[in-house]
Image: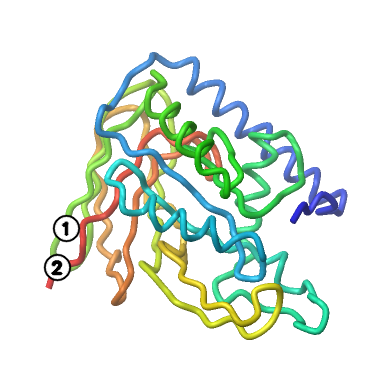
Amino acid sequence: MDRSAFPANVAAMKRFAHAIAVTAALAFALASPATVAEDAPTVVELFTSQSCYSCPPAEAFLGELSARADVVALEFHVDYWDDLVYGFAGKWKDVFSAPEFTDRQQDYNLAIRRTGSVYTPQMVIDGRADVAGTRRDDVFAEIEHQKSTVRPRVHVAVSHAQPGGLKVALGGGAPAAAGVFLVRFLGSHVTAVRSGENKGKTLTNTHVVREVRSIGEWRGRPITLDVPDAQLADGEGCAVLVQAAPTGPILGAAACPAPTG
């Protein structure tokens, strides 16, 4: 779905100003000394909806990518499909959709594609490039391109801390500042869709993002962050992203270790 009319002038101006900030962050990152972290995973973010007919194959593909040790796969459910009425099938409210995930997608599109239009299924790779989520070969090629590109990277290591929290160790690197974000996701969920474009289908979603929150800031030097309130519910996992802006280039990432006990 191309949401090219995302509309009001005030909102558009705010998005444009944010895009300028993200672009500036990207330019600064690219101007920094080039480094390579050989074990740095590539982050793949899928923007999707349970109400989108063409999205289930991309969601299944993300499930495959989530099994790769060199990929942090995250699934964001947007909300602009929720009110679409599909003939006699009616409409379906995606059980995981949230307006903040729609905002995240639009900010990426302003920064990467220089447009306010959005579409699903869309994969954003390392916060730097986008590919249609159904184009498997293009996605594989872009993952390899991002992995092989010499650019500033931050080593990220996440470990358990007592009692029940996390410890996030960040390496040194380029003289740049970036935010550090904890992404909490549901490992897997099966939904029986009763209406809308996917009426009658049973959808399996993987690494479904429920929350993205800031846990600190990285200023180019090694630092360790304590996250005492990072306890996860049953079936949940998490990842840590070091990102030049909330939707800027990703400088480093790591999956959280599996819960203990």
Element type at mark 2 = loop
Mark 2 crowdedness (10 Å alpha carbons): few <14, some 14-19, many ≥20: few
For residue 141, side relative to residue 91 (left or right): left
Residue 160: mark in rendering: 1
Quick one: label 2 or label 1, which is nearer the N terminus? 1
Which residue sits at x=49%, y=19%? 30
Q: Is residue 189 above or below residue 173?
A: below
- Amino acid under label 1? His
Q: Choose between 252 and 13: the one closer to the eye.
A: 252
Q: Which disc number belongs to residue 214?
A: none
Q: Give above or below for 217 relative to 64.
A: above
Residue 32 position within the rendered picture, expressed as x and y whole percent measured from the top left? 44, 16
Asked if 93 appears above or below 100 in the picture, the reply is below
Quadrant in which the N terminus is drawn: bottom right
Figure colour scheme: rainbow
Residue 153, given in percent of the width and then of the height, sits at: 35, 28
- The picture places residue 43, in percent across and down from the top left corner, at 42, 43
Tag 2–tag 1 contact (CB < 8 Å)? yes
**Kind of residue indicated by mark 2:** Thr
Q: How many marks?
A: 2
Q: Residue at x 38, y 23 (%)?
A: 148
Residue 261: quadrant of the picture:
bottom left
- Is 65 in front, or is 130? 65
Element carrying mark 1: strand
Q: Is residue 59 left or right of residue 9?
A: left
Q: Residue at x 46, y 70 (%)?
A: 204
Distance from disc 2 to disc 1, alpha carbons, whole Å, reads: 8 Å
Seen at 64% across and 74% down, the residue is: 198
Q: Which residue is mark 2?
A: 260
Q: Nearer the viewer, mark 2 or mark 1?
A: 2
- Please provide percent x and percent y for residue 229: 29, 66
Are there few (<14), some (14-19), or many (20+) residues within 10 Å of tag 1?
some
